[in-house]
Image (tube, rainbow, N blue to C red):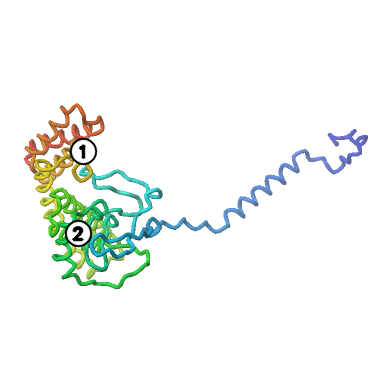
Amino acid sequence: MNLLSGLEKFGLNSKDMKDIFSEDTQEKKAKVSKKEVAKEEPPKPKKEEPKETDFLLQKAIRCPVCDKVFKTLLVKNGRIKRKESDRDLRPRFMYIDTLKYDIASCPYCGYTAMNRYFEHMSTTQVKLIKEGVCMKFKPTSEISDEIKEIDYDEAIERYKLALYNAMVKKGKISEKAYTCLKISWLYRAQIETLEAELEKEECTPERKVSIDKQLDIARTEEIAFYNQAYEGFEKAISSEMYPIAGMDQNTLDFLIAVMAFNLKKYEVASRGVSRLLTSTSASSRIKDKAFDLKEEIINAIRNGK
């Protein structure tokens, strides 16, 4: 029996259309076969993770000491994605550690400083740098225009050179303290990188021994520079006007309180937190962080840590 009989008047031949669902079945089969084909297709390659150099650019700057122009690496701020910073304000970003590039170092005369301090010098400071740095400086590598990643050893070396310059030019206490803090942060980042390498299966026993030695040195240096930074900021708040190292009073009070806590100076940390919690100018965000820190101070004292 042809259920479609009578459609002939429309010029349609329904003799071969006895199975109402035949086309549907064919469609399903076609869809299934397409799915099977799709399954057989090779997986798409994973998107390659960005390299640190993808976020860098070169900028030509003039050295205020020797007056020569050189190229320095800067971070493309518009491209980087911020992650949650450490409690002591150490910045973190995806795919790049911006701290490594917050420094300018003249390859001709050796004058080096963090970017915020590089161009700001008095004539007396220029003279001091020429006598105390330039006359002794020996370049360690050829000048290159290539954009390449700076490793932690090189970054730390550049910051130590900046600290030396700051001492020679008799820079502000806060400049030296901030430089020490950033060196400490770089050691912390290096420790994290080395510890992650230790966890890898391909890490050989010989490499593990080498990493353990590096970690011992890095941990010692991290604490040493952290202590120097803390002492420097404590002195700076009594001798300098705000902003200090680009920070307002509440930000620096919070930083010092966190540093004091990390160094187990709980009384100092507690006083700093109390000032922030009673401050009329501190933001609610800093007050929330200060309150959390207060709880940790209480727990640390209670547990005798």
Q: Quadrant of residue 138?
A: bottom left
Can you identify the residue that label 1 sits on? 248
Vertical position of residue 4 compared to residue 56: above or below: above
Q: In terms of secondary structure, where does tag 1 sit? A: loop
Residue 132: where, in percent of width, then height? 13, 65
Position of residue 182 measured from the top left corner of the image (x, y, whole percent) = 21, 53
Q: CA distance from mark 1 to mark 2?
A: 23 Å
Residue 302 is situated, as x and y percent measured from the top left of the image, at: 8, 35
Front residue of this view, candidates 137 and 55? 137
Give the quarter of the figure containing the C terminus. Answer: top left
**Figure label count:** 2
Answer with left or right where residue 140 lies relative to residue 147.
left
Location of the N terminus by quadrant is top right
**Residue 264 lies in quadrant:** top left
Left or right of 220 on screen, residue 95: right
Q: Is residue 284 above or below residue 239?
A: above
Tell me if label 1 and label 2 are in contact, CB under 8 Å: no
Residue for point 24% across, 31% down: 283
Give the residue displayed 68% in from the left and 45% down from the top: 28
**Residue, x 14% and y 39% (percent of image)?**
257
Other residues around mark 2 within 10 Å, as few (<14) / some (14–19) / many (≥20): many
The amino acid type found where label 2 is placed reads Ala
- The residue singled out by tag 2 in the image is 162
**Helix, strand or loop for disc 2:** helix
